[in-house]
């Protein structure tokens, strides 16, 4: 098919995510390799968002492709009721990479149903029903995960499920209160969170779920002591701490999991994306030894036809082995420092950049109309003039592929990116933001 034929058929029969369907003009991609994409006309793009922050090892990884082929020759699918080698091996590999309090894994199809099942497991284990989560969070678009989410993508599933409670993020850049230190900020947020837990009746709260580091809503990195404070509140009241590592996990931040930066051990960890890097969809829920032991005598009321799909598990094994053999964490930390230095320089240079936040190869540039007032480039939850899509379209036209959310531009390249590739890409971003400076 020609590129025009592909686009015509796509628009005629596919519904695209998070978009009005009438004015779509999707790129027709016909080839992908490493950090690059090519469209039907042969134009090359640098994949600077790792697709949806999941293509951690880039495109065309032969280790993963070969593992899928070899498993397909044995069998492609068997019911989750059977014990099969790839599912058994991958479960052990996941637990081996978790803290020593973790016990078993329940595999899912992706991040949304990982969070759905994490919440369900917490409720079954505690026999409580309330779930607390933050406003600037995204945990998935299915009904339960959508209710756990706090940002505008939850509106489509409202009115919501009873018992889903929201609290505010530690978003220091936009906080109305000024703090002398991160520790002072943490004390403020923990005081308010503990107060809210008490008002909600802690005996009814099953879990506090939070993206360890807030993802698409701005790469909001918690202040010093914050996650330890959440852990302390959970321990005090018998609440399960669920860390959503769907985006943050699997080496993205320079650690295998983001919670390792903060010296905490969750009770439950949800994951997806970087475990297979999109070669075949897979997610999962890792639970503590205490929780896994509970289900020795209680029914685990969770089930999915494709839980631990053999092809996906084979891809996961190859992916985790690839992280190890290429010392990907060392590379992420090396490239992450370069990315952070570049973004700090861009923040100093550009009038339109209010803040930059980065950890490992995961970052957000927060665009503003005025650095002094911090007026965002677009109002929260609205972009009536389509400003951010215009900026992203300009970036893509110059070969820098990424996405925006609210007034943030996400920069999260594949973890295999070289310094030369990174600097070339950021030069494009620098040029486009120079034009945005003129616009404001």
Image (spheres, rainbow, N blue to C red):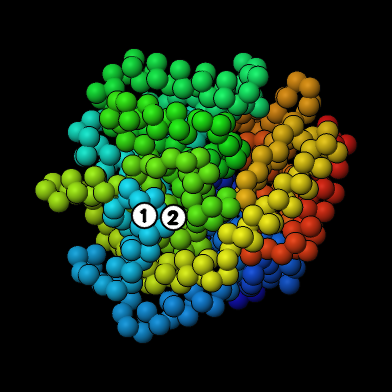
Label 1 Cα neighbours within 10 Å, binned few <14 / some 14-19 / many ≥20:
many
Q: Secondary structure at mark 2?
A: loop
Q: Secondary structure at mark 1?
A: strand
Q: Vertical placement of 166 versus 317: above or below?
A: above
Q: Which one is in front, 256 or 374? A: 256
Point out the image quarter for the N terminus: bottom right
Q: Quadrant of residue 236?
A: top left
Image disc number at residue 272: 2
Q: Are marks 1 and 2 in contact (CB under 8 Å)?
A: yes
Image disc number at residue 56: none
Q: Position of residue 221 (x, y in %)?
A: 58, 37
Relative side of 206 to 62, left or right: left
Q: Residue at x 47, y 34 (%)?
A: 227
Q: Which one is in front, 160 or 255? A: 255
Q: Position of residue 312 (x, y in %)?
A: 39, 68
Q: Is residue 334 visible?
A: yes
Relative side of 63 to 144, left or right: right
Where is mark 1, residue-wise?
Answer: 284
How far apart in space, not on screen, are marks 1 and 2 (Cα)?
6 Å
Q: Position of residue 47 (x, y in %)?
A: 66, 60
Q: Vertical placement of 323 versus 357: above or below?
A: below
Q: Residue at x 58, y 59 (%)?
A: 329
Q: Quadrant of residue 172?
A: top right
Q: Residue at x 43, y 21 (%)?
A: 193
Q: Earlier in the sequence, mark 1 or mark 2?
A: 2
């Amino acid at each position: 098919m020609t590129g025009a034929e592909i686009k015509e058929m796509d628009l005629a029969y596919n519904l695209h995510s998070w978009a009005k369907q009438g004015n779509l003009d999707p790129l027709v991609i016909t080839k992908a390799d490493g950090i690059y994409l090519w469209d039907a006309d042969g134009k090359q793009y640098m994949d600077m968002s790792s697709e949806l922050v999941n293509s951690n090892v880039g495109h065309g990884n032969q280790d993963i492709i070969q593992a899928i082929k070899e498993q397909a020759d044995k069998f492609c699918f068997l019911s989750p009721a059977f014990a099969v080698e790839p599912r058994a091996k991958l479960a052990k590999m996941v637990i081996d990479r978790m803290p020593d309090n973790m016990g078993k894994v329940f595999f899912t199809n992706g991040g949304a149903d990982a969070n759905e099942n994490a919440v369900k497991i917490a409720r079954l284990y505690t026999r409580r029903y309330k779930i607390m989560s933050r406003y600037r969070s995204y945990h998935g678009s299915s009904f339960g995960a959508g209710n756990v989410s706090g940002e505008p993508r939850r509106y489509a599933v409202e009115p919501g499920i009873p018992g889903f409670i929201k609290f505010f993020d530690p978003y220091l850049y936009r906080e109305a209160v000024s703090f002398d230190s991160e520790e002072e900020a943490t004390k403020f947020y923990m005081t308010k969170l503990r107060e809210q837990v008490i008002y909600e009746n802690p005996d009814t709260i099953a879990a506090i779920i939070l993206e360890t580091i807030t993802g698409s809503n701005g790469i909001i990195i918690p202040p010093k002591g914050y996650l330890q404070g959440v852990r302390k509140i959970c321990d005090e009241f018998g609440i399960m701490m669920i860390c959503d590592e769907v985006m943050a996990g699997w080496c993205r931040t320079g650690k295998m999991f983001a919670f390792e930066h903060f010296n905490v051990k969750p009770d439950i960890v949800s994951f997806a994306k970087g475990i297979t890097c999109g070669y075949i969809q897979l997610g999962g829920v890792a639970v503590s030894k205490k929780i896994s032991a509970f289900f020795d005598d209680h029914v685990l009321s969770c089930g999915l036809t494709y839980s631990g799909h053999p092809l996906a598990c084979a891809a996961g094994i190859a992916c985790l082995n690839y992280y190890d053999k290429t010392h990907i964490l060392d590379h992420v930390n090396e490239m992450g420092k370069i990315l952070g230095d570049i973004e700090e320089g861009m923040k100093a240079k550009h009038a339109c950049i209010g803040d930059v936040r980065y950890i490992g190869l995961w970052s957000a540039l927060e665009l503003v109309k005025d650095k002094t007032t911090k007026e965002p480039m677009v109002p929260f939850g609205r972009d009536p003039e389509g400003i951010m899509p215009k900026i992203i379209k300009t970036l893509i036209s110059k070969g820098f592929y990424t996405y925006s959310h609210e007034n943030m531009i996400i920069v999260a390249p594949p973890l295999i990116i070289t310094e030369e590739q990174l600097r070339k890409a950021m030069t494009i971003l620098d040029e486009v933001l120079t034009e945005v400076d003129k616009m404001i």
